Image (cartoon, grey):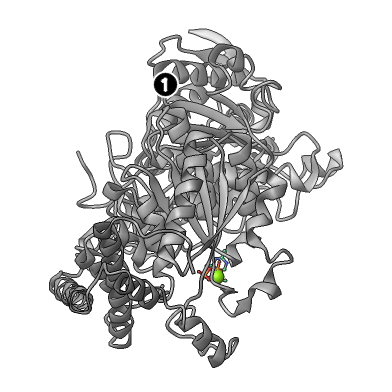
Amino acid sequence: MAEMRYREALNQALAEELERDPNVYLMGQDISVFGGAFKVTEGLLDRFGEKRIRDTPISENTIVGLGVGSAMTGLRPVIELMTINFSLLALDQIINHAAHVRYMFGGQVSVPLVVRMPQGAGHQLGPTHSHSFEALYLHVPGLLVAVPSTAADAKGLLKTAIRDDNPVIFIEHETLYGQRGEVPDDPDFTIPFGLAAVRREGSDVTLIGISRMAQTAERAAEQLATEHGIEAEVIDPRTLRPLDLDTILESVAKTNRCVIVEEGWPHGGVGANFAALIQEQGFDDLDAPVGRVTGVDAPMPYAKSLEQISFPHEEQVIEATLALFGDRKRASRG
Amino acid sequence: MTDHQLPPSEMSLEWLRSMTLIRRFEERAGEQYTRAKVGGFLHLAIGEEATIVGTVAALRPTDYMIATYRSHGQALARGSEPGRVMAELFGRVDGLCRGRGGSMHMFDLQRRFMGGFGIVGGNLPLAAGFGLTSDYLDSDDATLCQFGDGASNQGTFGETLNLAALWSLPVVFMVTNNQFGMGTSLERHSAQTDLQRKGEGFGVPGLECDGMDVVDTWAVTTEALRIAREERQPVLVEALNYRFRGHSIADPEDYRSEEEVLEWSKRDPLVTFGDRLVAEGVLSDEQREAIDLEAIETVDAAVAFADASPEPEPSSLYDDVYVLSDQVRGWYSADHRGAGLQKGEDLS
Ligand SMILES: Cc1ncc(C[n+]2csc(CCOP(=O)(O)OP(=O)(O)O)c2C)c(N)n1
Ligand SMILES: [Mg+2]
């Protein structure tokens, strides 16, 4: 184990996979000389050269399409988009081609492509640079979607993403890049997709946190325990496609209550989707409606005071959780 | 109108065969559409055979070719079995894409026919990707990407030409200027109507060919591919041609006059090339008829093959959504069957 930042863990994963497989290459805007907008690719140019660490023009849709074409013909591109908001310009290539060419051509080709990008609010970047779109990509059959929330997961999941033969949408979080965590040293350390992490065990309620919200849920769980006597189980699904629904349902069968926490918008969100799955599959286990805590239903504002109330914090998670217990637990609050 | 000499006679005859097959195939596909054997959209390439065959003739078997939703002909010219192309139109299991793609999405990896794309302009970035692979692996395979005059207005056109020139990718971009994007004529959709010049600002030189003349198309494309392959730089070729049928099957063609169609039909690539072969003593009238009969028989057999091919099994619906492995063991879905790993899709 070594302690390192989330960004360093990503950098290490990229370096190890570049080392392991000569057909892996990186491309994106300002990833080589500049080292990446968030410095994830720093130092890789010196180590691997400009053939494999490629700066591109500002042409998101075409960069992704180029990646798809090269993936269809034997390479393993890892593309960095500066933020998830800019991936909207590439939705055509991501959905119509990356996700669908294999199916549409009857399985004759595969698209081993990774598109990495950060999302999330907190840096006062306003309505074009701060959103969370995991729900958008979760919607699309043919894509795999990863949302790592720790340094170890960032490394282990990225290595798996690069090795997998499916197109992967790999969603990082802007506010996590500087966070430190313990990361295994083994160069063959990987984390399989479709395996949720139970961050905290508990028997009273299941909290599911997506992306950075897994951490918010964990902090809320500590407060629920100390201040309200509620033991929350915290689950970080880590990948949304494939989804480890079994772990979620097993937990709900034990706790009988569930709250989903996400940073994105409420309508058609990840929580909406999970709530549907949980009530379809685990209705008899539920003692209360599935709760959701989401970002507010508005574009992301610039002003710090407004931005901070636009995405979930521990208070909202605690409030939503207590609401599931009715008066009995509420009474024990003070 | 061509100054080029004919290629050796066996080659000339092969081109005539290929163009004839495409013509008869397309006519029959249209017929099958009216009999409801074919669904969806059906974009025919009648009139554009010389552009297709001349281009394919210039390619090596290992070169990548990529085209649009109007590409039954490209598949046939690349050597895909006519029966499998027809079966794809019929939506049957023996179709090139097992009935997943349909008319707009032909694909034959074995023959490096890389599709068949329904998004106007969407195939250009992929072509650059194939070029990048060739470059990355130090291979001298080149890529040829066909798209329409209308597609030259997409952002991907400029973005891809810029990238291909910047990275010295061995790609020939061929704009097949059939004078219309659906019902919008060239001068109504493009400020620059001399399309071969549209790459200049990106550093991509332009060439022009007579897309109604298979020999000229072949000669110009051969040179373009040489530049791409040897000089490692992309080229834009404008192939001037005309489609004799509507954009898709359902097209009243109010946007053009009968006189215009008649005028262009005097340049029917199949007729003019056949006439030339006869005039130059390469082809006899009997041979010409025999080639036509052979094409008709091939198409008859293709229809029979497609008709006999089964419909895809409902249980195959989720096949190939993902590459399955230990990693992705199945299709974790939520549908009327419930959520979870679906039966028959779990490898374990
Ligand atoms: C992105 C996109 N926009 C619109 C369409 C609908 N559409 C299909 S073909 C076509 C015309 C394209 O014209 P052109 O590029 O000249 O090709 P042609 O059909 O003449 O071969 C249009 C508008 C589409 N398929 N994709
Ligand atoms: Mg056109």
Q: Amino acid at mark 1?
A: Pro
Question: Can you tell me which quadrant of the image ligand 1 is in?
Answer: bottom right
Residue B103: image x %, image y %?
Answer: 36, 69
Residue A83: image x %, image y %?
Answer: 67, 38
Residue nearest the observer in this picture, A33 or B20: B20
Q: Along the horizontal axis of the image, is B98 left or right of B65?
A: left
Q: Is residue A281 among the parts visible in the rendering?
A: no
Chain for numbered disc 1? A
Q: Quadrant of residue B35?
A: bottom left
Residue nearest the observer in this picture, A277 or B115: B115
Q: Is residue A36 among the parts visible in the rendering?
A: yes
Identity of the residue drawn at 16% across and 76% down: B297
| Residue that label 1 marks | A22
Compared to residue B236, the image places residue B129 above or below, namely: above
Identity of the residue drawn at 30% across and 78% down: B29
Q: Along the horizontal axis of the image, is B34 left or right of A112?
A: left
Q: Along the horizontal axis of the image, is B92 left or right of B103?
A: left
